[in-house]
Amino acid sequence: MNNKISILFSVLVMCASAVLAEDKRPNIVVIMSDDAGYSDLGSFGGEIKTPNLDQLAADGMRLSSFYSNARCSPTRASLLTGVEASYVGFGGGVVGDWVRELPFPAHRGRLPYQQPLISELLGANGYQTMMVGKWHLGGSYIKDNVETMSPAWIASHPPGMKLSKEEMQLDYLALPPQRGFQQSFTWIGAQGNLFFVEGDEHEYYEGNKKAKLKFESEYTIHQFADNPWAKQQYTANHGKTAKAFYATDGMTDKALLMLDDAAKKEQPFFMYVAFRAPHLPLQAPEELVQKYLKRYEDLQAVADNRHRGLVEQGLFPKDAPVRDNSWIWTEQKGGQSKENIENYQLKAALHAAMMEKLDANVGRLVQQLKQSGEYDNTLIVYVSDNGGAAHIGDLMNQPYTGVKALLWEGGARTHGIISWPGVIKPGSISDDLIWVGDLMPTFMEISKTQFPETFRGAKPRPMDGRSVLASLKGEEMAPPEVLYLNDKGQQSLIYEGRWKLLIEPGWYLQTSAKEGIAYELYDLSVDPGEVNNLADKKPKLLKQLIAMADKKRIESAVVDYAEIIKIKPKDPY
């Protein structure tokens, strides 16, 4: 009998030890900005005041070669699945809105219910899971609002797509509360006002219910618009001084409450903070806008200083050439009128004000983690979903070429910071090629979570990303053989982290108007600014990479964009 009791006690001790070991697994906090420029941060050469993100970089690691999918929804899809975007419905530049959804698996614009998300797998393995911010991965509450929402669904979808009870249920199942987030405060779609005053209609949800916003802080509101449609949609509160809900502050308020609650429990937690800034519409407190207007009186100096800052910080090669885009923000080379330059300066000031606000709220999150005693056991990841967008990105992505939705480095390569006390060396820089889809495999490894062979009765696609834990620990990792992106007629392929092929890069309406197919080939090891096109000088390599890109395109079932615009003629606009 005593022997049986001894054995039972030993088993209980072993189980308790296992639980305690699990309790020591790290918390994971992912913070994502929306359309931030590569060189926006002080720690990435920029002039914007970002002391909290800069401190996070000083305490952790900067990623000089972090790659997104160059567009918001595709990047978010790979972040949460670890899978190339086309295999989970976000190929070819599709985003998570009804007007973008198509009847092709690679372009469905909604995450498949049979592909596990990191939130679902961590939640099943003992983690608390929370999200605040922008979702933009499809889904709606049409099943609860059939009469009012059905006309919009029918009008926005091609004739071949039918609205059924099953379709409405799948839309519901695509939303954060049904995808593993135990607590959520989210904006489901792409964009909308960041300021709301009492009485305004809004689209925030807390769990599956319409959220009740708090209007506790007073702001003098600046809402920018430079076309009639935007003025109608986004300027109702412009110039007002009033108590309001401001997205960047208000979402953080919710995140702090969740973190405070999570810290009181024994289980580790996963939090996804998806800020809506500095995405359009450009909206920020007036005093911050005025502060930055003075800094952007000389836009060329800003561009030059950003380039110089990155070089000085060891984040861009000193002797690498860069393209001269000065005509975009100056009068040089037959460039802009004085009126256009002043408009650009105002947009830059608003972008910067939104980034400073974002940084201040990152500081609040970090402070909460420290006050609760969780900071030392928390992995914090900060990245942007893509480079700066077309309205301001050419400046904010300096010295890289291109903007959001274009596959040059300025669209796809973003700044990145990872902090993990006791694991990541403070003040370090990793030049390893790390892709957004590598984050989920890394989280799986550090949380001791297994990827399932079956999920909801189906066999999911294995993760395409790889764990980069070794890189975080300071060990150099070889690049993946291939990183492939496809966006509205464009293709890019980075081979062995060095050779970059671009097929038809640029805006579709411009590239399709030219005869033939444009190819660009760059050696990123010496030419990250993509200045010297080697396509004619290396025909053998060019042919090899074109064949690799064709293979990837066919395997991913991305539909030729010329066929897509036959279905949705307004899509290129």
Image (tube, rainbow, N blue to C red):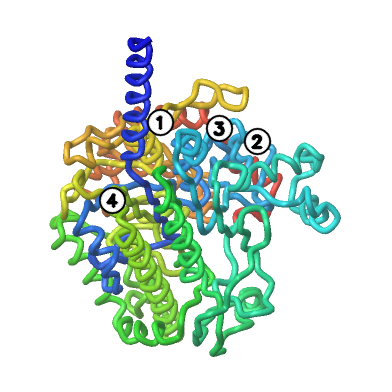
Horizontal side of 14 relative to 242 (left or right) equals: left
Disc 1 vs disc 3: Cβ atoms closer than 8 Å? no
Badge 2 amino acid: Phe
Task: Identify which residue, 126 or 137, lies in the foreground.
Answer: 126
Report the disc number at residue 104. 2
Which residue is tagged 1?
449
Disc 4 secondary structure class: strand
How packed mark 4 is, by other alpha carbons closer than 10 Å (few <14, some 14-19, many 20 or more), is many
Task: Identify which residue, 477 or 308, lies in the foreground.
Answer: 477
Which residue is tagged 4?
418
Which residue corresponds to the image point at 78% horizontal and 56% vertical from the top-left?
A: 152
Which residue corresponds to the image point at 21% horizontal and 71% vertical from the top-left?
A: 305
Which residue corresponds to the image point at 20% horizontal and 43% vertical from the top-left?
A: 423
Disc 1 vs disc 4: Cβ atoms closer than 8 Å? no
Q: CA distance from mark 1 to mark 3?
A: 16 Å
Task: Identify which residue, 155 or 564, lies in the foreground.
Answer: 155
Which residue is tagged 3?
115
